[in-house]
Image: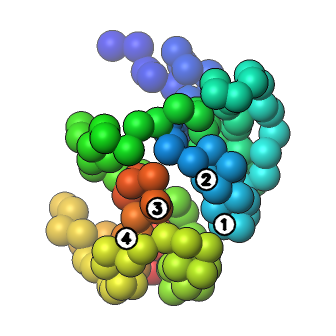
Amino acid sequence: MTGTNQILGGGGFHHVALRVVDFDTSITFYQKLGFVPVRNWGETPKRAAMLDGGDGTVIEIFEGGSPDVPSEGRIIHFALRAKSCDAAHALALQSGAVETMAPKDVDIPTKPVPYPVRISLVKYPSGELIELFQER
């Protein structure tokens, strides 16, 4: 079997795409979390933008989401790497997110040894569930 890295040229996660109910508010929210707009296209009501988290991880925002569409489906959540889960959590709440799980230490029961992390969950008003993820 050919290695994925050979096919993808290094591979890794590039972006997650979200169709949001309020485009401008969503852009502002992710900017407050440190994401920087790097590309945008389209005109209202079909605008789109890519915001970079500083390490090449991108959130792609599309306008035109319906408040009637369930925000949780096959994608359970997406996780943002944080230097401090607690600080990122507080910033997300200050920026309009709603807490669904306060920061806590978790030992993910991986084999052969557990994976110690500190995580929290917030829900943004468009409904996306965001895990703030800090390795311990």
Of callouts 2 and 1, which one flags the residue occurring earlier in the amino acid sequence?
2
Q: Do residues under tags 2 and 3 come within 8 Å of each other at their CB atoms?
A: yes
Measuring from the top left, give residue 3's x and y in whole percent.
43, 21
Distance Cα–Cα, label 2 vs label 4: 17 Å
Q: Give me the disc on residue 124.
A: 3
| Other-residue count near label 2 (Cα within 10 Å), few / some / many at <14 / 14–19 / ≥20 | many
Distance Cα–Cα, label 3 vs label 1: 12 Å
Q: Nearer the viewer, residue 89 or 127?
A: 127
What amino acid is found at the position of numbered circle 4 in the picture?
Leu
Measuring from the top left, give residue 94's x and y in whole percent.
60, 81
Q: Do residues under tags 2 and 4 come within 8 Å of each other at their CB atoms?
A: no
Q: Would you say 3 lies left or right of 84 here?
A: left
Q: Residue at x 32, y 74 (%)?
A: 100
Measuring from the top left, give residue 27's x and y in whole percent.
68, 51
Q: Nearer the viewer, residue 101 or 83?
A: 101
| Secondary element at image label 2 | helix
Q: Residue at x 55, y 84 (%)?
A: 90
What amino acid is found at the position of numbered circle 1 in the picture?
Leu
What amino acid is found at the position of numbered circle 3 in the picture?
Tyr
Of callouts 2 and 4, which one flags the residue occurring earlier in the amino acid sequence?
2
| Residue designated by label 2 | 26
The image quadrant that residue 28 belongs to is: bottom right
Q: Quadrant of the C terminus?
A: bottom left
| Residue designated by label 1 | 33
Distance Cα–Cα, label 3 vs label 4: 10 Å
| Residue designated by label 4 | 121
Q: Quadrant of the N terminus?
A: top left
Of callouts 2 and 3, which one flags the residue occurring earlier in the amino acid sequence?
2
| Secondary element at image label 3 | loop
Q: Is residue 124 above or below residue 92?
A: above
Name the mark nearer the viewer: 3 or 1. Answer: 3
The image quadrant that residue 116 belongs to is: bottom left
